[in-house]
Amino acid sequence: MKDFRGKVVVITGAGSGMGRDLAIKLAKRGAKIAISDVDPTGLAATEKLVAATGAQVHSQLLNVAEREAVLEYADTVAKHFGTVNVIFNNAGIAHNGDVEKMEFKDIERVMDVDFWGVVNGTKAFLPYLIASGDGHVVNTSSLFGLLSEPGQSAYNSAKFAVRGFTEALNQEMIVAKHPVKVTCVHPGGIKTAIARNATMSGDDPNHDKLTAAFEKYLLRMPSEKAADIIIRGVERNRARVLVGNDAKFLDLWVRLVASGYQGITARITALGTKRFTK
């Protein structure tokens, strides 16, 4: 996808953060934009910002976990614009909690949005992308799709699943010789509201302190810059895009130390929790 001019680009989770920035930046590159989110206020704000660029924009409330709704949405967007070239499966949520304390429903909720939402979006739009003759699937995994973290088992599970699904899809498109490129995105610490909006298991009196510390010290890259990196990776047809030096470093670190990273990460997390909850 070397040139977005005139291309129809679909972005889920566009009501804020990276989704919003992707929509605005791609609109400025001449793309026709279809945006969706579950947040009507955020979605309306993004629609206004995209429209201000002069780009054509289609906006619709959508829960990516609802498969039939996503299938209908794909048909609606394709009918509206006449074709679809790119899908950014970007919508995501998080949940904090140890496996011991989590309810099954907590894990299912994250998997429904973060993994099945990606599957739903990919399956719904893939026929249109193939038919376009110049398609691209861009699925958002995470740094936590490269390594695991205590208290993030649900999120880790979904993001590792997105990685496996997307890498397999990429190979399938190559084997079938379909005109569709596939990119898996692994953002590191990006300044978005996902940590602040995350649900949690139980009543942890230290939750707010730990969230504030996480946002202050780990979520460092502006989402606008992250969007630029993602777009550049898609333009270069990269199969994997690591967003941020933290993602690049930790990806290399896990490759070097293999499973040894788990014990180190556990100890670092324990020390960090102790420090920020005093």
Image (tube, rainbow, N blue to C red):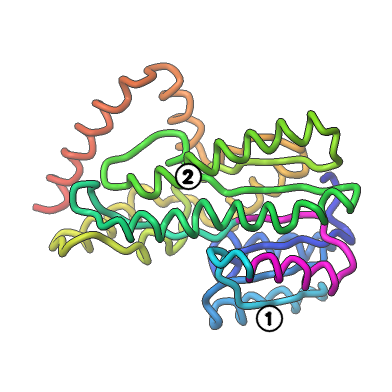
**Above-or-below relation of 55 to 94:** below
Q: Where does the N terminus fall, quadrant-wise?
A: top right
**Above-or-below relation of 38 to 147:** below
Judging depth in this view, the residue of 96 and 161 nearest the camera is 161
Q: Amino acid at mark 1?
A: Lys
The residue wearing badge 2 is 159
Mark 1–mark 2 Cα distance, whole angstroms, equals 31 Å
**What is the magenta range?**
69-89
Q: Residue at x 58, y 50 (%)?
A: 226
The residue wearing badge 1 is 48
Local secondary structure at mark 2: helix
Where residue 269 appears, as percent x and y from the top left, is 23, 39
**Above-or-below relation of 204 to 158:** below
**Disc on the earlier residue, 1 or 2:** 1
**Res 211 → quadrant:** bottom left
Q: Which residue is situated farthest in the top direction here?
A: 256
